[in-house]
Amino acid sequence: MSLDETIDALKRAFPDVGASEFRGQRRVVVPREAIHRVLRALKEQYGFDMLVDLTCVDYLDYPDATDRFGLVYLLANTETNERITVRTFVNDPQPSVPSVVGLWEAANWLEREVWDMFGIRFDGHPDLRRILLPEGFEAHPLRKDYPLSGRGERHNLPVIRRGEA
């Protein structure tokens, strides 16, 4: 099945899914409520067996944005070498989506990184804790409303010197 046929079948199965193409890259936009079902279908029915990446975009202050955060899943079919981008959107005050660790083990650390940097919760994640910043760090520094100079957290973090770790 070609990527165009896959997207057409996906749109028939999930009527709320939108699709577009830019410079040969195919992407679908999925409502938050259907994201896990769509990702499961892409893996189990259409052969997208590899989660290449998972990241987030903060659309705060974008003039045409209607949602605060956009999650971006990059998937690959290792047999056909096709790739697809799957996007969904979440908003404050409690942005969350279902975890896909059960579908792709690679999502474990990727979801932890998005949680750490943006504060997006992944419901059902087996170990959602900080991966880049210390546990005592309370903010999410890649959010657009986080000040460039920080909020004075550094002086409260323990100093670790070489040889002490």
Image (spheres, helix red, strand yellow):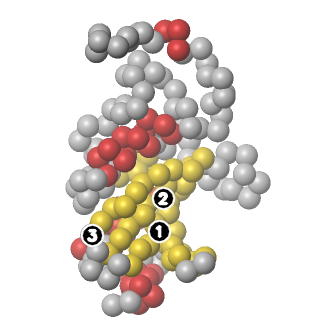
- Amino acid type shown at disc 3: Asp
Secondary structure beneath dot 3 equals loop
Secondary structure beneath dot 1 equals strand
62 in relation to 22, above or below: above
- Tag 1–tag 3 contact (CB < 8 Å): no
158 in relation to 12, above or below: above
- Going from N to C along the chain, the mark reached first, 1 or 2, is 2
The residue carrying pointer 1 sits among few (fewer than 14), some (14 to 19) or many (20 or more) residues within 10 Å by Cα, namely many
Label 1, label 3: how many angstroms apart (C-alpha)?
A: 13 Å
Label 2, label 3: how many angstroms apart (C-alpha)?
A: 16 Å
The spot of residue 50 in percent (x, y) is: 30, 66
Q: Which mark is residue 48?
A: none
Residue 141 seen in render: yes
Residue at numbered disc 3? 49
Seen at 35% across and 71% down, the residue is 76
Q: Which mark is residue 72?
A: 2
Question: In the rendered view of the protein, which quadrant contains the C terminus?
Answer: top left
Using residue 147 as the reference point, say whether residue 104 is left or right of it.
left
The residue carrying pointer 2 sits among few (fewer than 14), some (14 to 19) or many (20 or more) residues within 10 Å by Cα, namely some
The spot of residue 34 in percent (x, y) is: 40, 65
- Amino acid type shown at disc 1: Thr
Indicate the quadrant where residue 147 lies: top right
Seen at 51% across and 68% down, the residue is 29
Seen at 64% across and 38% down, the residue is 144
| Towards the viewer: 140 or 96 | 140
The residue carrying pointer 3 sits among few (fewer than 14), some (14 to 19) or many (20 or more) residues within 10 Å by Cα, namely some
Secondary structure beneath dot 2 equals strand
Q: Which mark is residue 85?
A: 1
- Tag 1–tag 2 contact (CB < 8 Å): yes
- Amino acid type shown at disc 2: Val
Question: In the rendered view of the protein, which quadrant contains the N terminus?
Answer: bottom left
